[in-house]
Image (cartoon, grey):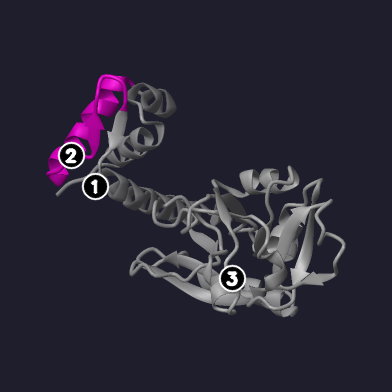
Amino acid sequence: MELELRQLRALIAVEEERSFTAASERLAISQASVSRSLAALEHTLGTPLMHRTTRRVEPTDAGVAFAGTARRVLAELDRAMAEVRGEQSTVRIGYAWAALGVHTTPVLRGWNRQHADTPIRLVRVNRRDAGLVDGLVDLAIVRHPVERADLESEFVGVEPRVVAMPVDHPLADHDVVGLAELVPYLVAVDRHTGTTTATLWSFAGHEVPSMTETADVEEWLDLIAAGDAIGVTAEATAHHYPRPGVVFVAIDDAPPIEVHVAWHRQLRHPATMRIARAIRAAYDGAGLT
């Protein structure tokens, strides 16, 4: 089996752009070259990677999976070439909602000062894996259990939960609230990456409040600011997304949320464990290492 880098780049461009025309413009080559490269790759792999129609191009399941692998391979190659040339090799860290909350800026500035050869860049990807599976990032900050066999993770800290509510909400002037006090109100949850589920109340022996789904953190905050719902989230959200019209109040009887750094098992960035230690030190209040 022989694969060419141009074939991998063509696959990634078409998978992301969903158009041969847009992919050719992005790669600065002809549309015919993109089409030939993709066709050759499909022939080599022995399976279709794209569904082609007169109006749109959609990746097959194999196309999505192989595009993720291609992104990881190209990122690893770019990193190796940068090291040989003595250039910077940026570490892309994905997150879905709040990165590291209050620790975000200190970790970024501290790491980048001490490790100018491997600076950190944060990338927001509203997916449960924060872009790891598709090769969009090298590492990810996650607040869910990592259950995929191709991913690994390291625990770095915990965050208390808070409730987000409109400024004129009856509980908005409280210093702390309990889960039972939230039951009468509609709770907004992110159906893709949110950390709030019915079990938060049922495990504590409370009635489960009514819930409504939102697509991401911005829609979640807009709904709350409008006075249409409340939301339960990690304390990091309060630091990362202050929003006019929204207040955050501590919850005194909710379990904390665990924070993990996750990475792809087969292509672990060389700086992974050092970054995980630096983040854990920040959560522990011990500074960077």
Identified by mark 1, the residue type is Ala
Measure how far apart labels 2 and 1 are at the Cα level: 7 Å
Q: Image point 50% across, 53% down: which residue?
A: 191
Q: Which residues lie in the magenta part?
A: 30-56
Q: Can see residue 145?
A: yes
Q: Which mark's residue is nearer the viewer, 2 or 3?
A: 3
Q: Give residue 13's position: percent from left, percent from top.
A: 37, 35
Label 1 vs label 3: CA separation? 43 Å
Task: Say which residue appears at 64% left-offset and 76% top-offset.
Answer: 256
Q: Which mark is residue 207?
A: 3
The mark found on residue 48 in the picture is: 2
One can see residue 160 in this view? no
* Amino acid residing under circle 2: Pro
Q: Nearer the viewer, residue 123 or 41?
A: 123
In the rendered structure, are the residues bearing label 2 and label 1 in contact, judged by CB atoms less than 8 Å apart?
Answer: yes
Element type at mark 3: loop
What distance separates the C-alpha of mark 2 from that of mark 3? 49 Å
- Disc 1 crowd rating (10 Å Cα; few below 14, some 14-19, many 20+) is some
Residue for point 32% across, 25% down: 56
Q: Quadrant of residue 204?
A: bottom right
The location of residue 193, given as percent across then percent down, is 52, 57
Residue at (26, 21) in percent of width and height: 32
Residue 268: image x %, image y %? 43, 66
